[in-house]
Amino acid sequence: MYFACPPQGYCRRTLCVSVKDMDLSIVIPMFNEAENAESTLNRVEEVLAFLNGTYEIIAVNDGSLDNTFEILKRLAEKDGKLKIVSYSKNMGRAWH
């Protein structure tokens, strides 16, 4: 699942899992991380596998100019715990 957010920098949609149903949400901002996205997410999954509870990983594509978004979409199709939020232009989300 992924959401494309408008360039204004906010997204009016909510992710499909309510907060009360989720024990942990990990948010990972990404900008031009095509080379690292898959290994980063795999490592996070390895660590979270030991969690005795429910979790989700939210990857935020912050207007990447490479194919980060395409990689994230491919990975999300295989992993129901991975959600994607995508901005069409870089909004500096890693710094806020």
Image: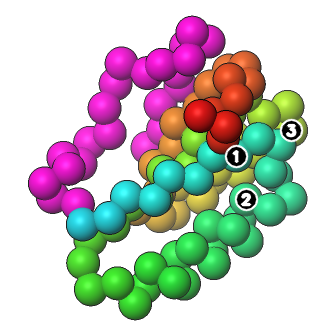
In the shown orientation, is residue 94 left or right of residue 14? right
Q: Amino acid at mark 2?
A: Ala
Residue 93 screen position, x and y as percent: 63, 33
Residue ID for mark 2: 37
Residue 14 screen position, x and y as percent: 31, 32
Q: What secondary structure prevails in the magenta region?
A: loop
> In percent of the image, x 67 and y 37: which residue is there?
95
Q: Disc 2 or 3, which lies upstream in sequence?
A: 2
For the residue pair 49 and 2, the one nearer the viewer reads as 49
Q: Residues within 10 Å of mark 3 (few under 14, many from 20)?
A: few
Residue reaching furthest to the top: 8
Label 1 and label 3: CA atoms lie apart by 11 Å
Residue ID for mark 3: 66
Q: Nearer the viewer, mark 1 or mark 3?
A: 1
- Dot 2 falls on a residue whose secondary structure is helix
Q: Judge whether residue 23 can be spotted in this image.
A: yes
- Dot 3 falls on a residue whose secondary structure is loop
User: Label 3 near label 1: C-beta < 8 Å?
Assistant: no
Number of numbered discs on residues = 3
- Which residues lie in the magenta part? 1-22
- State how the image is colored: rainbow
Q: Quadrant of the N terminus?
A: top left
User: Label 2 near label 1: C-beta < 8 Å?
Assistant: yes
Q: Nearer the viewer, mark 1 or mark 2?
A: 1
Residue ID for mark 1: 30
Residue 80's place in the image compared with 71, above or below, is below
Residue 25's place in the image compared with 55, above or below, is above
Q: Residues within 10 Å of mark 2 (few under 14, many from 20)?
A: some
